[in-house]
Image (cartoon, helix red, strand yellow):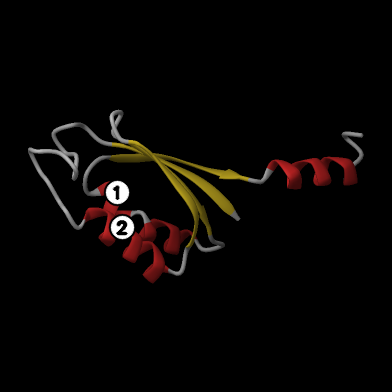
Amino acid sequence: MMYMVYHKHTAEMCPGGNVRPDKEFLAKLNSQIKESGVNLIEGYLDAPGHEFYLILETDDNAKLNTAIEQLRLVGDTNKIVPIMKFSSAVEWAQKMKIQK
């Protein structure tokens, strides 16, 4: 199953900022995701807004939580929603006969 993980931190907690810099943050996050066994489909950043949007794939909730622990250390990761590709949704809806 795929999940969209939304994360936000403050400027004061930003690992790329001046107050609490962590030059290894992205490497640690990437490593943690890989080691957890979760598949990172893609990640997007709004650097000025201090927001991350990650698309992760896993069937194991514990692995998902392990994968994003690095984000929790610097801010809020309180929105994790299951998602599917639009093309898959179209196929499913047609199969179920709820769409043409």
Q: Quadrant of the C terminus?
A: top right
Measured as percent of width and height from the top left, residue 47 is found at 30, 35
Q: Residue at x 44, y 58 (%)?
A: 64
Q: Residue at x 10, y 43 (%)?
A: 20
Q: Nearer the viewer, residue 73 or 23?
A: 23
> Which disc, if any, is residue 44?
none
From the viewer's perspective, tell me whether residue 51 is left or right of residue 89. Answer: left
Q: Are marks 1 and 2 in contact (CB under 8 Å)?
A: yes
Figure quadrant of residue 69: bottom left
Alpha-carbon neighbours of circle 2 within 10 Å: few (<14), some, or many (≥20)?
A: some
Residue type highlighted by circle 2: Leu
Q: Residue at x 43, y 64 (%)?
A: 63
Q: Nearer the viewer, residue 71 or 60?
A: 71
> Which disc, if any, is residue 71?
1
* Residue that label 2 marks: 29
Measured as percent of width and height from the top left, residue 1 is found at 60, 56
For residue 64, above or below residue 3:
below
Q: Nearer the viewer, residue 35 or 43?
A: 43
